[in-house]
Amino acid sequence: MLDIKQRISEILAEIIPALDSGEIKQMLEYPPNDEMGDVALPCFKLSRILRKSPIQIAEELAGKIPADPKIAKVEAVSGYLNFFLDKEEFVRDVLSTALNKGNEYGSRDMGKGRNIVIDYSAPNIAKPFHVGHLRSTAIGNSLYRIFNFLGYNSIGINHLGDWGTQFGKLIVAYKNWGSKDSIENGGIKELMAIYVKFHEEAEKDPSLEDEARDWFVKMEQGNEEALQLWQWFKDISLKEFQKVYDLLDITFDSQAGESFYEDKMPPVIEELREKNLLTESHGAMIVDLEEYNMPPCLIIKKDGSTLYATRDITAAIYRKNTYDFDKCIYVTGAAQSLHFEQWFKVIELMGYDWHDKLVHVPFGIVSLGGEKLATRKGKVVLLEDILAEAIKKTLKIIEEKNPDMDESEREEIARQMGVGAVVFSDLSNNRIKDVSFSWDEILNFDGETGPYVQYTHARTCSLLKRAETDVDPNFDASLLTTKEEFRVIKTLYLFPDIVVSAMEDLEPSIITRYLVDLAQDFNRFYHEHSILVEDEALKNARLALVLAVKHTLANGLNLIGLSAPERV
Ligand code: ARG
């Protein structure tokens, strides 16, 4: 497919000797409305270099542009140089590319041979899978898919929180207030309840904290009783997490959690020592980061136990050796930004030149009706409950819209759309922004939502089905002349670049926003024009457009981890 900005910047480079085509390409814009052309050069960007007013520059350039088969006309308007594409050429080019590539439209092989490690989801054992972990899971899963689509080899790691002092607390809590039966039956909720109880009791009796620390030290020393309890807590938790992953349709390449690094930490600690990076402070071992305006990075506690950062440093070295990554991406809440900054620095101080391949991708807080979703106090909204509620609500909407669909199909579609609604809403804001969760907003089939995009995709499928013929790839591009059709085609054209931007900015919301735009453009066309018309040639050309939209919506949905059901 023709790169129109590229083509125009090459033409302009011939007549603006002061700049090369790459610099010009950066300046080109897609104007907000079609009357202002399809691509524009805002000439104020050249004023300083050419020492002329934007109006003068635009007019002079307009007079010098040579004829080009891809460009229908060029206009100078108030300091902008507006290019109008030859529509027929452009329509043919975009639609045939989208039709030929089908479910690969938008993909590239730019990442060939390069590994991208993505560390995401990472819930904590014996604690609930909450809405914050959903954000990590949804963003990480989307990045995983985007990198793969661009030819990279993504490696998804669920760095489970399955090691640390909290297990000492849990063991103490279990011994004091738990029972085998209540935990077998109550699962994570019961583990959570005794964990909360521990914190309440420890406020009154601080010696419980010491007891808990002792148990974690025992775990690190390989004490059998401690490890058996830990394994049991872990199995119970994993079983429940798996339910969520099944609903979300997510798998990982590795579930090596924090405990996996237990036997890999001693050599790393030794290495830190040899490199003279460890200093003692109040009995603990730290890496001093004062010079870098950061608090010290704690490596070993006074009682000899290791920490979250110790495991992250060890895991990064292990992953570099195992996967030789081009990037190692960590998707967590912004509250952990300092943690990552600190230990990335430690990796740099260790002399590893790949420290700059470690990337923290932070995100904002999720709230429900304005309330922060805390875990310590036990007031927490479980993701599983939210998903179940979303599916239930969607089922009701589908029953009303489509009463004669059979039950098992309806249930599967309700799962795909209910889960899709939650995930889409989670992804649709810039990830760093805090989000507030509202049922009415996320399930609105006419709003900027997952169900709206899925519904539009199903509409394209139903049109293609009702047409009862296959789309002839030799469609007549000259028949797609309405402004609504051209708008859809211009949006389709943008998709491959949108995918690259989402990858570069590590920002799935670029895709959600695009999908809403494309769905809106398509629906405007659908409402203004008949598609299944008498005229065979026109019908076929419009169906080609419908099919290209179907592929693009499906590909985009897939990149954010949503299903694209054919019917809703
Ligand atoms: N388990 C942590 C949490 O729930 C997230 C882990 C993120 N990954 C990492 N390598 N630190 O906050």
Image: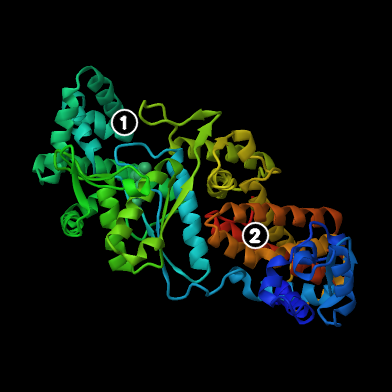
Q: Which sits in the foreground, 415 or 298?
A: 298
Residue at the image position 27 percent from the left and 60 percent from the top:
350
Q: Quadrant of the N terminus?
A: bottom right
Quadrant housing residue 479:
bottom right
Q: Which sits in the foreground, 27 or 514?
A: 27
Asked whether mark 1 and ligand 1 are closer than 8 Å, the reply comes as: no
Q: Amino acid at mark 1?
A: Met
Q: Is residue 347 above or below residue 362?
A: below
Q: In the rendering, at what x and y percent does residue 14 appear?
A: 77, 82
Q: Is residue 84 above or below residue 518?
A: below
Question: Residue 519 got which mark?
Answer: none
Q: Secondary structure at mark 1?
A: helix
Residue 169 in view here: yes
- The crowding category of the residue bearing disc 1, from other C-alpha atoms within 10 Å (few below 14, some 14 to 19, many at least 20), is many
Asked whether mark 2 and ligand 1 are closer than 8 Å, the reply comes as: no
Q: CA distance from mark 1 to mark 2?
A: 41 Å
Residue at the image position 61 percent from the left and 37 percent from the top:
396
Q: Which sits in the foreground, 233 or 543?
A: 233
- The crowding category of the residue bearing disc 2, from other C-alpha atoms within 10 Å (few below 14, some 14 to 19, many at least 20), is many
Residue at the image position 78 percent from the left and 72 percent from the top:
91
Relative to 299, is 82 on the left or the right?
right
Q: Is residue 430 above or below residue 31?
A: above
Residue at the image position 62 percent from the left and 74 percent from the top:
101
Outermost residue on the top side: it is 204
- Which residue, given by chain and number where applicable, does mark 2 sit on? 553
Q: Which sits in the foreground, 139 or 364?
A: 364
- Which residue, given by chain and number where applicable, does mark 1 sit on? 192
Q: Secondary structure at mark 2?
A: helix
Q: Is residue 381 above or below residue 47?
A: above
Relative to 568, is 261 on the left or the right?
left
